[in-house]
Image (tube, grey):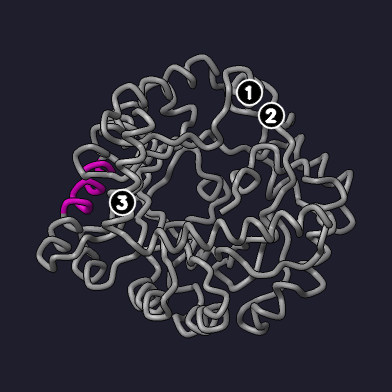
Amino acid sequence: MSLGGVARTVAHTIIAHPSLLQWYLRTRARRRSLKRELETGSPTSARPLGITLKPTYCCNLRCSMCAFVASGAVEAHPRDSLPVESWARLIDDVAPYEPYIWFTGGEPTLYPGFIPLLRTVRERGLLCGVTTNGTTLERLADEIAEQPMHILVVSVDGGEEVHNRVRGSSVAHQRMRAGLEALREACRRRRTSGPALVLNCSLSPANYRDAADVVETAQRFGAECINVQHLWMLTDAMVHALNDRWGKEHYLDPAEWGGGAAPDMDPAIVMDTIAEIKRRASGVPVFVHPDLSPAETRLYYQEPETFVRRIKAACAWINTDILPNGDISPCFGVVCGNITRDSFTDVWNGSEFQRHRQRLSADGDLTICARCCSYWRRD
């Protein structure tokens, strides 16, 4: 798509979803103060730009590339998570910062209180996004349409056969498409624009040769864009290197966190697949995360412990995860507090969070940052 086409699509998205413009402007403003914090190595942060909620690790699919499947975390029962009231208190606590709230998991829509919690976020005036496999949308379409999230990210791995193979289900693709259709119809009946739809295509050994059919789903359902995501990796070598450097303070158990060897993916085919997605995606912008040159792509997959670019890790100054048990966790294995006993406001610039930022400032990044999605983000 040409730059003019991208500009027209962005303008259309903003007109249909004006709250996204406010989010964009807040992000730009926060980046300016973030730059100062990183340059000075400040252990404190002015405010979080976003907070990622993981209300449950439970999932109804068994994706071949998912670390939670490998660890068995997806077998958790969604009712073992925190009650809605605990999450609602968190939302009330952070609302003055005006962060965006993002739901992921696991499959966040399996959390029994998902709809009430979504409404709480919207009623507090916060921008809200959800990443989902889409298989529950048909059941939830009417309730979502009453007060939808601002951004809906649906994971799609390719066409039906490829998607179902990756997801470990013979009906995942069909249910995802039925859910998108049901949500579109529910929003049409209410004469609302519904959420901005983004399709996320994660490249993995199971789909990177034939993921380009994701474009057909994007075009059929009017996706605002396709996000092609390079495979995130956490190898044994990364874990051991972290423990050698920071093991007394930030230790990762290799049995729990070690990811084994890097997956076998041909960088040339990765680049060909991305080019094919862009070629087919007439009218749909395609973004690649991270956006790599051919040389960087080869390095990314052939030497995963080597940084393709060195930038200062900013994640701990702008975002954190909240885990199903309430732990406030800005990085693998790092817990700075818990929302069931601590105020998020106190934890955000508390001693544990400050020490984590100091570790990042000391080296600029950690060995486990090399193939982590958060390393590349400034939003």
- What numbered label is drawn on residue 13? 3
**Gap in angstroms between the C-alphas marked 2 and 1:** 6 Å
Residue 99, horizontal then vertical, whole percent = 53, 69
Of callouts 3 and 2, the N-terminal one: 3
Q: Is residue 116 above or below residue 8?
A: below
Residue that mark 2 sits on: 308
**Three-letter residue code for mark 2:** Val
Is 37 part of what is drawn in magenta? no
Overall secondary structure of the magenta section: helix
Numbered circle sitting on residue 217: none
* Image quadrant containing the C terminus: bottom right
| Whole-percent x, y for residue 131 in the image | 41, 54
Foreground mark, 3 or 2?
Answer: 3
Camera-side residue of 3 and 269 = 3
Q: Residues within 10 Å of mark 1 (few under 14, many from 20)?
A: some
Q: CA distance from mark 3 to mark 1?
A: 31 Å
| Image quadrant in which you'd find residue 157 | top left
Crowding at label 3, few (<14), some or many (≥20) Cα neighbours within 10 Å? some
- From this viewpoint, is residue 75 visible? no
Q: Is residue 31 left or right of residue 138?
A: right
**N-terminal-most mark, 3 or 1:** 3
Contact, CB < 8 Å: mark 2 with mark 1?
yes
> What residue is shown at x 18% (from left), y 50% (from top)?
178
The disc at residue 296 is 1
Q: Is residue 82 left or right of residue 164?
A: right
Q: Which residues are magenta?
A: 171-181
